[in-house]
Image: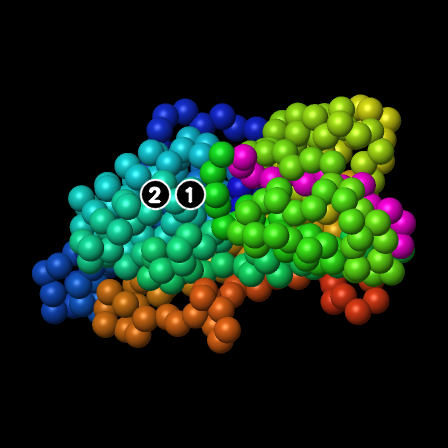
Amino acid sequence: MPRSNSMARRVVAVGAITATAIGLTACNRGSSSDSAGGGGDTVGVALITKDSTNPFFVAMQKGAKADAAKNKVKLTVASGKQEGDDQGQITAIEDAIARGDKGILITPMSTGVNAAIKKARDAGLYVIALDTPPDPADTVDITFATDNREAGKLIGQWSADQLAGKPATIALLDLFADKIVSVDYNRDQGFLEGMGIDVADPKKNGDEAKTGTYTGGKGGDYTIVCNEAAGGAEDGGRTAMEKCLAKNPNINVVYTLNEPTAVGANAALEAAGKKALIVSIDGGCAGVKSVKDGVIGATAQQYPLKMATEGMAAIASIARGGEKPKPDPGLDFKNTGVALVTDKPADGIKSITSDEGSKICWGN
């Protein structure tokens, strides 16, 4: 989700696309093809992430690279410069078609890349979305992702429990203000649903009533102060939180799209001499440490390595005549799991501790 360790340091990506081709030697057994044909041949796969600096996407890339040899995959890793760089992903998709790759793994930036994905599928490439289901979902062949709605609900339920009936003065720090991305609205709207706040359009951020009553936990009154776009980055989180505090200095609940945003929001709160309950989603090692350190109250942990490695294995299998993966029952994607990480467990909400989360986290 918008996600090298940006919580401690930030690497600036230069150029429209970062691409690394990993050539993997495999013995050809009974075929002259070297890219995607029979059972022993190397399969060309492109992994296209939103950027190459967010620890979430860095973990995906590392996991796929490490697993490529096992699946006899010639992997090309590419990304846009930053969140919102549709054209960077479009170029990477077109390059995959030109190379004759058999499949694409992509964390789609927005609906702006849908036409390029269709072009790839029309050319015979099997396309799997990772982490971010496209809109509509059938833009790709299948999605491997966390249930982002469920992730949002978990941190919303936990927040309502922690409030113990007190009024909630809420800041919502989202991904974009000018793009519609499923991971963005599912996390935001899931959080509100978990709090027990009615959402209007479930696929739109910011159109719910700004005041009312939340029914989660012991229930109470709520005020939504702001929906601010943070771009999934630490500096964006700080700027967004500063804007929210300027509107209302008494914010006591902060939803953040991801953990770099949460760290930035905390910095703004500290600078203003304020404290608030901060919740987030991703579960990277730096984010789990922020839970341990008390910066983040709870985060919903997801598993980018699993998304990338299982997706890559699926494309390799399909290219060799294997069966296509199917969505999990009741969902339009294959669910790779989520766990609430907190050191303040709430009754009736399953969770793991930060120590437990640190054993299965990703990144540095």
SS class, disc 2 = helix
Residue occupied by mark 1: 110
* CA neighbours of label 2 inside 10 A, class few (<14), some (14 to 19), many (20+): many
Bounds of the magenta segment: 165-177
Answer whether residue 170 is magenta in the image. Answer: yes
* CA neighbours of label 1 inside 10 A, class few (<14), some (14 to 19), many (20+): many
Residue 116: tell me if it is visible.
Answer: yes
**Residue type, numbered disc 1:** Ser
Answer whether residue 59 is magenta in the image. Answer: no
* Residue at image location 66% in from the left, 61% down from the top: 339
Judge by depth and name the residue closer to the eye, 89 or 187: 187
Callout 2 touching callout 1 (CB < 8 Å) = yes
The residue most toward the left is: 32
Judge by depth and name the residue closer to the eye, 343 or 32: 343
- Residue 137, image x, y percentages: 40, 58
**Residue type, numbered disc 2:** Val
Image quadrant containing the C terminus: top right
Image quadrant assignment for residue 17:
top left
Rendered image coloring scheme: rainbow
* Residue at image location 40% in from the left, 33% down from the top: 85
* Residue at image location 81% in from the left, 36% down from the top: 251
Residue occupied by mark 2: 113
- Residue 214, image x, y percentages: 79, 55
